[in-house]
């Protein structure tokens, strides 16, 4: 399948609207530099790409019942974001593998939000997701470890339930294909599906996206994306924990559960480039290693060269090691200028400012600037207005790009999009249970032959 056809499938998921009135007129005006009459040629015509409405709060409308699948830190955070985004939302069902997680979340919702989730709607076990979805919810937050998300989304979609999917949405090739198929079904059913790539709902990013599509930096010729930070959290094994329980409680450090951090975390930055360009990579070549990680079987650093169909290259770098330089952000180069995300600024080729996001104007026009809340505003708006909007396919493609980079580093070989999208790679156990695992399958990958 060509890049154009892949992208068209998800760029058409929502009707495009006049961006200036939705993101905020003052935020899209050029600051200085450039010739006033030199109107750039757009990368994509207005109406062919999606710009979200970003009011401070979702529209009023019918009451909605929401369920949560995955009662960890991100799931609890997403509940708070949803309740901040809209009125008339009630959390009516909870599900997690572990009873203590469900109980802690139930207590937190009662304490922090004044809502009592009925005991009969609190479910545990690997089939808890089905029980949450079948409990009569209108919408569901899927915040389980990433390997489970394609199955959970597929089931929610089959039942006509609107989904919020944390990123990444898949960690292997089978999960990617499941997600793409379910996304098509969600579109056919007119559902609203928003993913946790919150930069798509972050005001400075959306404004920059609009400017880049209008052609302000010209044709895109390359870029760099980064997520370099200290070591992430981990869980030491406790007495009485089975292999499976330890791995799930420590999920962010195991590649079968998280996809490794290039997929689980760095997907944000890779996604920004694929979003801004409308492309996906055709091949990936890279390196990575494990230096200081304590648990799990993942790497703690990656450096990947992604090549695209038109010969453009993207350099991707991510690291989770204490005591090293930190950098999180994106840079995109074009024929007429560049976008430096960390400065929220577009420059021409001589370094003059062509456009800068106006923080003061944004502060005067809006009160809500948290993208984690605004993504839920967009989600609820589509549900209440009855307008189909599905982000799952786009995020699945960004997730597969991260998977390509991971496999390139693991194997030391150049990995192609076609290979990865069709690969017989399935990390999800057929019948997961809280018991013993074959731990010999979970070893750190070593590239090359070792000779």
Image: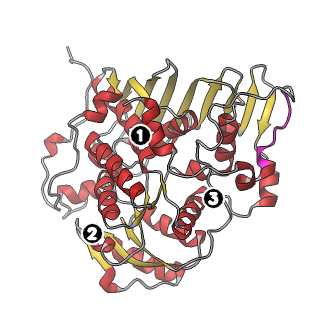
Start-end of magenta stretch: 27-33
Find out whether residue 378 is within the magenta segment. no
The residue depicted at 31 percent of the width and 60 percent of the height is 152
Q: CA distance from mark 1 to mark 2?
A: 26 Å
Q: CA distance from mark 3 to mark 2?
A: 31 Å
Question: Which percent across, then down, holds residue 72?
Answer: 39, 64
User: Which part of the image, by quadrant, shows the N terminus?
Assistant: top left
Q: Nearer the viewer, mark 3 or mark 2?
A: 2
* Residue farthest along the top direction in this orientation: 451
Question: Which percent across, then down, holds residue 190?
Answer: 44, 61
Residue 109 vs residue 182, the one in the foreground:
182
Corner quadrant of residue 165? bottom left
Q: Is residue 257 above or below residue 101?
A: above
Q: Is residue 148 above or below residue 266?
A: below
Q: Mark 3 Cα within 10 Å, few/some/many (few <14, many 20+)?
A: some
Q: Is residue 326 above or below residue 248?
A: above
| Residue indicated by mark 3 | 370
Question: Which percent across, then down, holds residue 205?
Answer: 64, 44
| Residue indicated by mark 1 | 397
Q: Is residue 409 at all visible to an observer of this figure?
A: no
The residue depicted at 70 percent of the width and 49 percent of the height is 19
Question: Which percent across, then down, holds residue 254?
Answer: 29, 46
- Badge 2 marks a residue whose secondary structure is helix
Q: Describe residue 246's horizontal placement relative to residue 65 as left or right.
A: left
């Amino acid at each position: 399948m060509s890049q154009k056809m892949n992208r068209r499938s998800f760029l058409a998921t929502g009707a495009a609207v006049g961006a200036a009135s939705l993101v905020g007129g003052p935020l899209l005006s050029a600051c200085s530099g450039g010739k006033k009459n030199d109107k750039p040629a757009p990368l994509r015509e207005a109406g062919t790409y999606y710009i979200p409405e970003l009011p401070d709060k979702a529209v009023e409308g019918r009451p909605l019942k929401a369920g949560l699948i995955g009662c960890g830190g991100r799931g609890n955070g997403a509940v708070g974001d949803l309740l901040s985004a809209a009125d008339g939302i009630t959390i009516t069902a909870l599900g997690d593998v572990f009873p203590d997680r469900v109980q802690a979340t139930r207590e937190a919702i009662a304490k922090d939000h004044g809502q009592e989730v009925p005991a009969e709607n609190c479910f545990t076990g690997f089939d808890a997701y089905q029980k949450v979805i079948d409990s009569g919810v209108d919408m569901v937050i899927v915040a389980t470890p990433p390997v489970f998300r394609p199955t959970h989304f597929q089931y929610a979609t089959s039942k006509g339930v609107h989904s919020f999917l944390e990123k990444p949405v898949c960690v292997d090739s089978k999960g990617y294909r499941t997600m793409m198929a379910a996304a098509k079904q969600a579109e056919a059913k007119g559902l609203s599906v928003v993913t946790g790539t919150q930069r798509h709902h972050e005001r400075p990013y959306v404004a920059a996206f609009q400017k880049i599509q209008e052609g302000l930096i010209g044709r895109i010729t390359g870029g760099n994306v980064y997520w370099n930070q200290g070591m992430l959290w981990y869980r030491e094994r406790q007495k009485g924990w089975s292999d499976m329980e330890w791995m799930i409680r420590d999920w962010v450090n195991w590649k079968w559960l998280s996809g490794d951090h290039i997929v689980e975390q760095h997907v944000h930055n890779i996604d920004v480039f694929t979003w801004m360009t409308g492309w996906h990579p055709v091949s990936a070549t890279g390196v990575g290693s494990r230096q200081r990680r304590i648990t799990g079987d993942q790497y703690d650093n990656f450096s990947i060269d992604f090549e695209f169909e038109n010969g453009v290259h993207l350099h991707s770098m991510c690291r989770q090691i204490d005591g090293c330089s930190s950098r999180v952000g994106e840079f995109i180069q074009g024929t007429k200028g560049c976008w430096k995300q960390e400065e929220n600024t577009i420059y021409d080729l001589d370094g003059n400012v062509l456009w800068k996001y106006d923080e003061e104007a944004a502060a005067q026009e809006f009160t809500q600037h948290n993208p984690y809340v605004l993504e839920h505003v967009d989600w609820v708006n589509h549900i209440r207005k009855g307008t189909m909007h599905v982000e799952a396919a786009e995020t699945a493609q960004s997730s597969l790009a991260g998977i390509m980079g991971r496999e390139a580093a693991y194997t030391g070989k150049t990995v192609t999009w076609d290979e990865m999208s069709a690969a017989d790679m399935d990390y999800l156990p057929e019948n997961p249970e809280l018991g013993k695992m074959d731990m010999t399958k979970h070893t750190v990958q070593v590239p090359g032959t070792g000779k």
